[in-house]
């Protein structure tokens, strides 16, 4: 399936900007209209997570637990045991961080089909500061047996991820960023859970991203015309499409992973351990370098901590020159 | 309360509970590990549920109309396994001695995916009431009349998650939900009122009342009391019900009763033989009545 880009997607003056959480909320409302067993369970952040698109239409299928994330998880588990398809929704640090052991025991262990949908993943959360910037959520979910972990790259992909999650089995985590980011895919862009997307073919290096960082990598590959860069979007972090990544690594011999997540336990570390087994090539993880950052606009944080296009390009060039 | 059950029926329930206690002792002795005080203390309530109250079909444990039993404090699972076995669930007699052993369906803490009839996996404390709320919401949404019985310990009320669920159940008027608290005043490190008091300020029962629940306080070994409370719980409208059941941990074995050191250890062979002898004497006395 060929990837379909939005028109003029590389032109920052023309590309549409919208947060992933908005796409996720719209996808949720579509699902609610299609399936009577979809339930939303929220913890006082429903509108902020854009779940109001669902809750305003389906108040009888909305459960508001208040500021109580552990309870949110347990309620979702109970609903799933009864065959409902609950979406547990709040900010990533609270949903995944605060409630991790209930997630492990009541959702992962019995393999309950609960979809955990989070906003506020990564430092893109911005001015709220590190308490609200979740940079450990991939590590915490990917280590749980049976979990599907989705990290959509933009608004449209978040919408498709939410809709696709309904048809999966077992627990699912979908991470969305708070900040508006470029919408470079379209409603017609293919989305298959478990398959990575090769956005651009190349032979000199494989660069891999998830979330909005994939857009940065496309910009960088376009700028560095002297290099032939293969760009891969990994919207499904688990189960990881390692075959395609291994094939690309064999071809290019170098793998660079960029993500808004701690480099410890993020996609980069997951790929590095898989490649070490199959095709041991140099791997560079570029992300949040095992620190807590600070308050600031997303733009300022990206600049200071090297996750903007310039900082990411510099990290890639440093890696390639080694 | 005697109107809902005859003396003869009560005697039969007492005998069943005694049998379940003997099974529990044998399971724990064979396993060489596990929790003793809680299962013995809750044998009467499990008997009242599985042999009188529940709408269930042991041969078809996933029957959609069944009442749900959510065991929050999973560590007392020997009493659930024993009650299910004696009630006719598909557990073989020899399987009882595999409790906690490799390849057994009788996990040390209940595993939903391994044993049909176990509604949830549980073990980490304070989570069952939240799950029970989820079950209760699902029943309400589907207009199903079955009841959700959540069994919880007193010690696990130190978990904040439990109180999150207490607020939620009252907010949404989950009157198809009843939590039965095993108020035995012990936990693994000692007496509840020493480890983390639940009656400080106001009693645990009054705490539930303050949160908007329908609250009943009963003797947890008095079948007339237990069955009467079940009826009241089912007829309550607009509020979830909390039954605070005063129980004796280790009930039926004198050297185990009210001794918190029996919370998390099994009897050795000698202790088990003595426990079984004591339970057999109680059984004989019941039969002579």
Image (cartoon, rainbow, N blue to C red):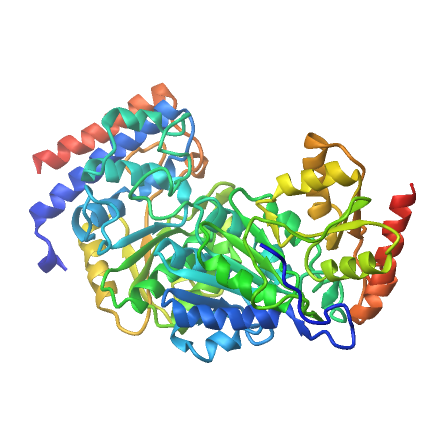
**Percent position (x, y) of residue B89?**
22, 38
Identify the residue at image location x=63%, y=57%. A151
Residue A2 at x, y percent in the picture: 61, 56
Task: Quarter of the image for the N terminus of chain B: give it.
Answer: bottom left
Is residue B250 among the parts visible in the rendering? no
Task: Decide: is B128 above or below A36.
Answer: above
Is B142 on the left or on the right of A63, as rendered? left
Judged from this view, the residue extending furthest toward the bottom is A56
Residue B27 drawn at (x, y percent): 32, 28
Residue A144 can be seen in this image: yes
Q: Nearer the viewer, residue A301 or A129?
A: A301
Residue at 81% over, 69% down: A299
**B211 or B201, which lies in front?**
B211
Closest to the observer, A193 or B133: A193
Task: Determine whether B281 is above or below A54 in the image.
Answer: above
Point out the image quarter for the C terminus of chain B.
top left
Residue located farthest toward the top when viewing the structure as drawn = B270
**Apparent side of residue B36 relative to residue A246 in the rendered image (left or right):** left
Please state which of residues A285 and B187 is positioned toward the viewer in this rendering. A285
Question: Residue B20: percent from the left, percent from the top?
Answer: 24, 36
| Number of disc labels | 0
């Amino acid at each position: 399936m060929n990837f379909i880009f939005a028109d003029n997607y590389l032109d920052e003056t023309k590309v549409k900007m919208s947060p992933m959480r908005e796409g996720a909320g719209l996808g949720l409302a579509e699902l609610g209209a299609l399936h009577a067993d979809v339930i939303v369970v929220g913890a006082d952040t429903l509108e902020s997570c854009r779940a109001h698109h669902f809750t305003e239409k389906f108040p009888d299928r909305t459960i508001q637990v208040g500021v109580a994330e552990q309870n949110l998880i347990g309620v979702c588990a109970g609903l799933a045991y009864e065959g409902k398809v609950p979406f547990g929704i709040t900010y990533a640090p609270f949903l995944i961080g605060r409630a991790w052991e209930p997630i492990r025991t009541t959702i992962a262990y019995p393999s309950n089909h609960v979809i955990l949908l989070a906003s506020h993943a990564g430092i893109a959360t911005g001015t709220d500061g590190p308490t609200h910037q979740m940079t450990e959520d991939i590590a915490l979910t990917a280590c749980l047996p049976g979990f599907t972990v989705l990290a959509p790259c933009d608004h449209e992909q978040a919408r498709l991820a939410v809709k696709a999650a309904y048809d999966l089995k077992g627990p699912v985590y979908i991470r969305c960023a708070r900040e508006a980011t470029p919408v470079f895919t379209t409603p017609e862009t293919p989305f298959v859970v478990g398959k990575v997307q090769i956005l651009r073919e190349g032979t000199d290096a494989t660069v891999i991203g998830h979330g909005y960082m994939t857009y940065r990598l496309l910009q960088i590959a376009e700028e560095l015309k002297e290099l032939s860069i293969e760009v891969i979007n990994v919207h499904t972090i688990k189960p990881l499409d390692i075959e395609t990544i291994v094939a690309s690594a064999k071809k290019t011999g170098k793998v660079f992973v960029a993500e808004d997540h701690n480099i410890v336990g993020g996609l980069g570390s997951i790929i590095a351990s898989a490649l070490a087994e199959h095709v041991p090539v140099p791997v560079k993880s570029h992300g949040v370098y095992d620190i807590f950052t600070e308050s600031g606009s997303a733009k300022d944080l990206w600049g200071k901590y090297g996750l903007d296009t310039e900082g990411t390009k510099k990290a890639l060039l440093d890696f390639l020159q080694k | 309360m005697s109107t809902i059950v005859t003396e003869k029926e009560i005697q039969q329930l007492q005998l069943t509970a005694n049998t379940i206690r003997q099974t529990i002792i044998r399971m724990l002795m064979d396993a060489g590990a596990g929790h003793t005080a809680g299962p013995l203390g809750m044998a009467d309530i499990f008997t009242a549920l599985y042999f009188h109250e529940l709408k269930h079909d042991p041969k078809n444990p996933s029957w959609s109309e069944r009442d749900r039993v959510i065991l929050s404090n999973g560590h007392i699972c020997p009493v659930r396994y024993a009650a299910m076995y004696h009630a006719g669930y598909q557990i073989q007699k020899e399987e009882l001695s595999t409790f906690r052993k490799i390849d057994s369906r009788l996990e040390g803490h209940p595993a939903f995916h391994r044993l049909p009839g176990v509604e949830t996996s549980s073990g980490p404390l304070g989570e069952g009431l939240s799950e029970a709320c989820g079950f209760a919401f699902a029943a309400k949404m589907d207009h199903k009349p079955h009841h959700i019985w959540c069994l919880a310990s007193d010690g696990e009320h130190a978990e904040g998650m439990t109180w999150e669920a207490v607020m939620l159940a009252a907010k949404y008027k989950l009157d198809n939900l009843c939590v039965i608290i095993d108020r035995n005043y012990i936990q693994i490190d000692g007496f509840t009122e020493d480890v983390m008091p639940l009656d400080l300020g106001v009693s645990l029962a009054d705490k539930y009342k303050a949160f908007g629940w329908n609250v009943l306080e009963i003797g947890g070994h008095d079948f007339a009391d237990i069955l009467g409370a079940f009826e009241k719980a089912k007829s309550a409208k607009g509020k979830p019900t909390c039954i605070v059941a005063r129980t004796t941990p280790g009930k039926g074995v004198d050297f185990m009763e009210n001794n918190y050191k029996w919370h998390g250890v099994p009897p050795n062979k000698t202790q088990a033989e003595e426990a079984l002898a004591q339970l057999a004497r109680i059984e004989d006395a019941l039969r002579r009545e």
